[in-house]
Amino acid sequence: MSRGILIVLSGFSGAGKGTLMKELMKTYDNYALSISMTTRAPRQGEQDGREYFFSTREKFEEKIAQNGLIEYAEYCGNYYGTPRDYVETKLNAGMDVILEIEIQGMRKVKKMFPDMLSLFVTPPDAAELARRLRGRGTETEESVMKRLNTAVLEAEGVEDYEYIVVNDDLKRCVEEIHGIVRAAKRKPVRNEEFINSIRAGLKVLAKGE
Ligand code: ADP
Ligand code: 5GP
């Protein structure tokens, strides 16, 4: 069994990352979605251990001190981080592991896993982002403005990603993400074991033995 690939998915708050991930997980069984730890308060309907591991700042800082996070970042005044154990276990089990994290986290993960795949999700246009953020009904107007201002900065970093996916129609976008992952898995750098076995076989045949 070959090791899975690590996929980082980022995008402006309200672009639809959570919605896309739910649909992707429902449709395909090769993915494992990492659950982050955060100090932000749960939104209505969110459950501890499902969307996030909700934590106090003290507990989060303890986890950092124990080296229990692959990466962490502060976003709009809260800590967010990726627990280490889950990622390694699932990759070794052959699953394709998705980290739904922001750009600072993506840059840190890239240093540790240079052959990870990175995707950036956007809405079809800026006005639609504001509509989705407000339409979700989970943020105060102050939090919406913070997130839109953060989006302005994030938009400057989009070139650091390998692919942009536009979340217009949800199901179409899920298919596009799955297609990109499938193609990425066929890159030679991610198939060294297979290529080496073909090379070895060819050498034997070419000797005529
Ligand atoms: P994120 O996780 O990126 O912050 P969410 O998944 O919470 O975003 O989505 C933000 C809002 O946009 C939600 O109300 C969601 O139902 C809506 N949404 C997500 N994808 C689409 C889409 N393709 N078309 C229309 N609305 C969408
Ligand atoms: P939200 O509060 O909307 O759930 O998430 C805010 C931002 O934090 C999003 O851009 C999301 O991708 C990012 N995020 C979620 N978990 C992590 C994490 O573990 N690490 C980092 N760096 N960012 C995260």
Image (cartoon, helix red, strand yellow):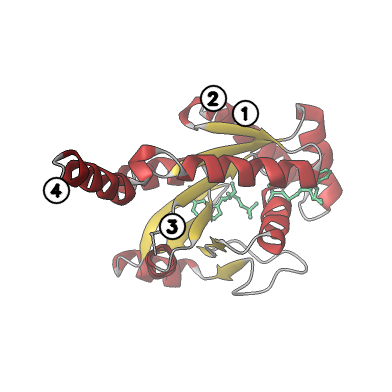
Q: Residue at x 30, y 70 (%)?
A: 66
The response on whether ligand 2 sits within 8 Å of label 4 is no
Question: Disc 3 on helix, strand or loop?
Answer: loop
- Residue to which mark 1 is pinned: 152
Amino acid marked by disc 4:
Glu
**Residue density around tag 4, few if under 14, some if 14–19, many if 20 or more, within 10 Å:** few
Q: Residue at x 14, y 48 (%)?
A: 209
Amino acid marked by disc 1:
Val
- Residue to which mark 2 is pinned: 156
Check if mark 4's residue and mark 2's residue have beta carbons within 8 Å. no
Check if mark 4's residue and mark 3's residue have beta carbons within 8 Å. no
Q: Earlier in the sequence, mark 4 or mark 1?
A: 1
Mark 4 or 3, which is nearer the eye?
Answer: 4
> Can the viewer see residue 130?
yes
> Can the viewer see residue 15?
no
Q: Name the side, left or right, on which 194 lies relative to 7.
A: left
Check if mark 1's residue and mark 2's residue have beta carbons within 8 Å. yes
Q: Nearer the viewer, residue 93 or 123?
A: 93
Name the residue furthest front. 208
- Residue to which mark 3 is pinned: 4
Quarter occupied by residue 169: top right
Check if mark 1's residue and mark 3's residue have beta carbons within 8 Å. no
CA–CA distance in space, label 4 to label 2: 58 Å
Q: Earlier in the sequence, mark 4 or mark 3?
A: 3
Image location of residue 161, percent across then percent down: 50, 32
- Number of marks present in the image shown: 4
CA–CA distance in space, label 3 to label 2: 30 Å
